[in-house]
Image (cartoon, rainbow, N blue to C red):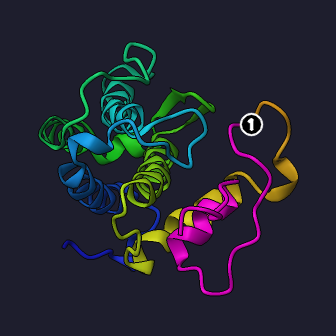
Amino acid sequence: MTTIDTTQQTDPRNVYAVAAAWVSGLLEAVRPEQLDLPTPCDELDVRHLAGHLVSTVGRLIAIAELGSPDSVSPWSSVHDAGTFDGLVVQARAAWADDALLDAPVVVPWGAVPGRSAVWGYARELLLHGWDLAVATGQSADVDPALVHPVAEEFRTMLPAEARVPGVPFGPIVESRPEARPLERLANFSGRSSEGWV
């Protein structure tokens, strides 16, 4: 697995790539009989969650190329690892120009610099990856060096006091004493571990 360069945490592209590689493995391991299982992400079963993960990569490509994700639906009927991997290759190429990290773009949560968009979509991969892992009985224990920079950016962007109606994250859930970093990030986003781990 690619490692995280903690000296360049202002550039989220490597973090995104490593998170995407992890999610690809999760998607590859989903069995057909698991597609209708529930997930910690309210109202999404495994099939729809996996399709959403695929679509998030297409939306990140659209942000790089068009400045907004609006041309790509957040939901996809395609949910296989091969499609996901192909889109990740396109996304990495689309974001290869360093200048894009400071370019203004529009994302579902507002107008931000490009780097904030990539951080946001890295967060999507980790949080929904946790959802997918626990829903399908896979390991959600990823390298803390992958989780830490995403968690730091998330805490800065959406502290506890900013959890107001309309924000797509619920109140912070207290973590289990033995919770690993990704579970703690999921709890910070409002997901409960109860019944899943």
Most common SS among magenta residues: loop
Total tally of numbered discs in the picture: 1
Tell me if residue 140 comes above or below residue 39 in the rendering. below
Q: Position of residue 3 (x, y in %)?
A: 26, 76
Quadrant housing residue 114: top left
Looking at this rendering, what residue extends furthest in the top direction?
Answer: 71
Q: Is residue 2 magenta?
A: no
Q: Secondary structure at mark 1?
A: loop
At a point 84% along the width and 34% down the height, the residue shown is: 165
* Closer to us: 137 or 129: 137
**Image location (x, y in percent) of residue 13:** 33, 55
Relative image position of residue 59 (x, y in whole percent) = 37, 28
* Viewer-nearest residue: 188 or 18: 188
- Please name the residue that numbered disc 1 is placed on: 167
Vertical relation: 5 (above or below) 156: below
2 over 36 or under it: above or below: below
Magenta region: which residues? 168-197
At horizontal 53% and vertical 29% (from top left) the residue drawn is 107
Residue 185 lies in the magenta-colored region: yes
| Kind of residue indicated by mark 1 | Val
Left or right of 32? Residue 154 is: right
Question: Is 191 left, or right, of 149 in this rendering?
Answer: right
Task: Classify residue 100 as left or right of residue 96.
Answer: right
How many other residues sit within 10 Å of disc 1, few (<14), some (14-19) or many (≥20)? few
Residue drawn at x 24%, y 39% is 91
| Residue 148 in the image, given as x and y percentages of width and height | 51, 73
Q: Residue furthest bottom?
A: 178
Q: Quadrant of the N terminus?
A: bottom left
Residue 164 shown left or right of residue 75 in the figure: right
Towards the viewer: 103 or 175: 175
